[in-house]
Amino acid sequence: MKTIRLAYLVLLTGLALVSLFSDRVLSRPYEFRTFQLSMINLTGILAIGCMSAGMFLATRPTSVEPILGGLDKTYRLHKWLGISALVFSTLHWLWVKAPNWLIGLGWMQRPSSKLDLPTGDTLSAIAHILSHYRGLAASVGEWAFYAAVPLIIVALLKRFPYRHFFKTHRLLAVAYLALAFHAVVLMKPAYWNTAIVPLIGLLIFMATLAAAVSLLRRVGYTRRAVGVIDNLTHHRDNRVLEIVIRLKDRWFGHAAGQFAFVTLDAAEGPHPFTISSAWHDDGKLRFHIKGIGDYTQSLPETVKPGDLVTVEGPYGAFDFRGDKPRQIWIAGGIGITPFLARLQARVRHPDERAVDLFYSTKAPDQVFIGAVEQLATRANVRLHILVSGKDERLTAKRLCEIVPEWMSADVWFCGPAGFGRALRRDLVARGLAVEDFHQELFEMR
């Protein structure tokens, strides 16, 4: 989280500072019209900057993933940028519209609209050409804004069905291209000799390519593999469906703890699921899918052995790497899946580090629990099963009592976000280094 917060602040601060210095608003005497235009430019630059960065991240770039700490962190930053783009574009719209409303009420006089063109034959010629499209760009940008606002709001509503979300979210690429046209044509000509143009130009160029990738449905195309469902096991007590997929295409392997986007139904689209098996170079992947929403609850009745599926990945940096002599794993509910993969990896490739695995569940399936216990024994991992409503809730205090050597361990958590935040806060308060608590942010919206 620290890395994506820093990336977010650097982007916003950088765009704001470059915009303000390019506009020279701080060195000019105050006039409302001058201030209004500066705010229109500033909010516009911040809005298109956030939209551009968010559009680029939506393509799941693997080059950025290690820097931000995994695709889960990348998507969290993507969400922040989307919200910020919504806020800044709304402010931009208000700075444009509000003075006109005041003029209509007779409370302000209409200012002059003289356009200062840049100096230099080439820049002046380009500005002259673009000036013919300023009216069109203003109209296109306004209607694109009206379209983008509900699309962004819908994307933030988790109750909106995923099968509709992944289709409507793609429409934002169309809205973005319209807004990029708006930004390029209406960019203040005086900016053309400043640093803001190459900065915004680079962001728009990268995002335009990303929008094309999205519209052509090529996101993650090079990381897709077609497979067939080989086996299904339904653990009814905890509503978990175990799916084994035999791949028909080449798979370059994955690390324990990574996840993939799995398309079991083309109409529903790809869903992210943690890979619950280690890679044994046998062409098989295993997923444990919890029946939480309408779609996942229906899977036991809708999928069957022999069905074709598409798997895209792997993604994620929940990889259990660390230099501490021991580790503490904490799984909440279906958050057990990355640890299942790591247990299998330890069986095949023994690790000398001592490990305690805490598995908290409110719906224990005895067959499933038995399989986890056997796997933990073979992997030389000390397993602690905690049944909600029956056993005492796992807290930082209790964890430290069970594992007295906790200060020499790093902690890996996958489960409910609130549970993770509470443990992280309390363990850090007790002396655990912030960077020694690793948490999967398994929310793609």
Image: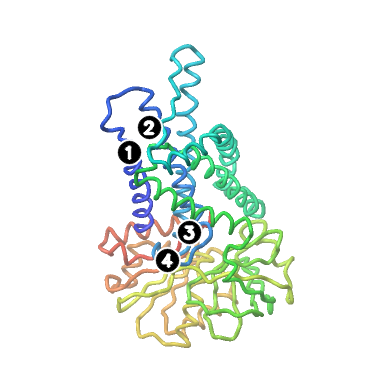
Between the C-alphas of marks 2 and 3, the distance is 44 Å
Between the C-alphas of marks 2 and 4, the distance is 46 Å
Residue 305 located left or right of residue 106: right
The percent position of residue 189, horizontal first and vertical second, equals 42, 37
Tell which circle, 1 or 4, labels the residue nearer the N-terminal end: 1
Residue contact between numbered discs 2 and 3, judged by CB atoms under 8 Å: no
Work out which quarter of the rendered image holds the N terminus and state it.
bottom left
Label 1 neighbour load within 10 Å: few <14, some 14-19, many 20+: some
Residue bearing mark 3: 416
Q: Secondary structure at mark 3?
A: loop
Residue bearing mark 1: 20
Between the C-alphas of marks 1 and 3, the distance is 42 Å
Label 2 neighbour load within 10 Å: few <14, some 14-19, many 20+: many
Residue contact between numbered discs 1 and 2, judged by CB atoms under 8 Å: yes
Between the C-alphas of marks 1 and 2, the distance is 8 Å
Residue bearing mark 4: 413
The percent position of residue 114, horizontal first and vertical second, equals 44, 25
Q: Looking at this view, is 146 or 166 the one in front? A: 146
Between the C-alphas of marks 1 and 4, the distance is 42 Å
Mark nearest the camera among 2 and 3 is 2
Vertical placement of 348 versus 45: above or below?
below
Question: On the image, which quarter does residue 430 sit in?
Answer: bottom left
Tell which circle, 1 or 2, labels the residue nearer the N-terminal end: 1
Q: Residue at x 34, y 54 (%)?
A: 6
Which of the labelled discs sits on residue 254, or is there none?
A: none
Q: Secondary structure at mark 2?
A: helix
Q: Looking at this view, is 335 or 279 the one in front? A: 279
Q: Residue at x 66, y 60 (%)?
A: 269
Residue bearing mark 2: 38
